[in-house]
Amino acid sequence: MSRLTLPPLVVVMGISGVGKSEIGHELADRYDIPYEDGDAFHSEANIAKMSAGTPLTDDDRWPWLESIGAWLHAHDESGGVVSCSALRRVYRDVLVSAAPRTTFLHLAGDHDLIRQRMEHRDHFMPVSLLQSQEETLEQLEPDENGELLDITPTPAEIVDEFLARTEVVDEQEGPR
Ligand SMILES: Nc1ncnc2c1ncn2[C@@H]1O[C@H](COP(=O)(O)OP(=O)(O)OP(=O)(O)O)[C@@H](O)[C@H]1O
Ligand SMILES: O=C(O)[C@H](O)[C@@H](O)[C@H](O)[C@H](O)CO
């Protein structure tokens, strides 16, 4: 079982269009803690590259991951929620080494549902990059602190399920 120490410090992860921003806001609002979008940490070059339909490389992603790790570290005391695709284990390890108590909320779902949702929003990320996102994704491993959630329910239901599945620990008061 994964662990959520309070105030929550959470990375909402998963491929593009899976609902990281939607679910991230929902979770942050529940605890009245800050939310930040991982896309805000991309360089202009990274955004231009993705907008043009070219997948990012590991080298494009390292500095971006370091910035998100720094955000997590800075929010260790207050808690916070940040969206970040965090597709590979080595990417997540960068985040965890910056902020060891991080909990991952991995959103995943049916390809066609994600495609449909992406087609109905106004966003720089082209649907054509969905395949490379899926190919790059590595599932959470058993020793990682996180949960995999399906994206079919409403955002509120997804957050309820995440909280039901994690051991919520108040460091001041112990498990509850
Ligand atoms: N559980 C849900 N039920 C219905 N619609 C949803 C749900 N989650 C997200 N959506 C919708 O799906 C679209 C994609 O969601 P969102 O932008 O939050 O994904 P994202 O993972 O943050 O994407 P990206 O990584 O590309 O920024 C949005 O239009 C959003 O409103
Ligand atoms: O690792 C990546 O390829 C990127 O983070 C993408 O996932 C985008 O930032 C995001 O999903 C688009 O909004």
Image (cartoon, rainbow, N blue to C red):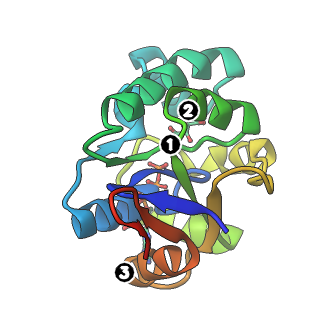
Which residue corresponds to the image point at 60% horizontal and 53% vertical from the top-left?
Answer: 14
Going by the numbered disc 1, the residue's amino acid type is Cys
Label 1 beta carbon less than 8 Å to ligand 2 = yes
Crowd class of label 3 (few under 14; some 14 to 19; many from 20; radius 10 Å): some
> Which residue, given by chain and number where applicable, does mark 3 sit on?
156
Residue 155 in the figure: left or right of residue 110? left
Quarter of the image for residue 147 reads bottom right
User: Nearer the observer, disc 2 or disc 3?
Assistant: 2
> Which residue, given by chain and number where applicable, does mark 1 sit on?
84
Which residue corresponds to the image point at 44% horizontal and 29% vertical from the top-left?
Answer: 68
Residue 95 is marked as 2
Quarter of the image for residue 38 reads top left
Residues at discs 2 and 1 in contact (Cβ within 8 Å): yes
Q: CA distance from mark 2 to mark 3?
A: 26 Å
Where residue 13 sits in the image (x, y, percent)?
56, 51
Crowd class of label 1 (few under 14; some 14 to 19; many from 20; radius 10 Å): many
Chain-order first, disc 2 or disc 3: 2
Where residue 60 sits in the image (x, y, percent)?
60, 17
Quarter of the figure that contains the N terminus: bottom right
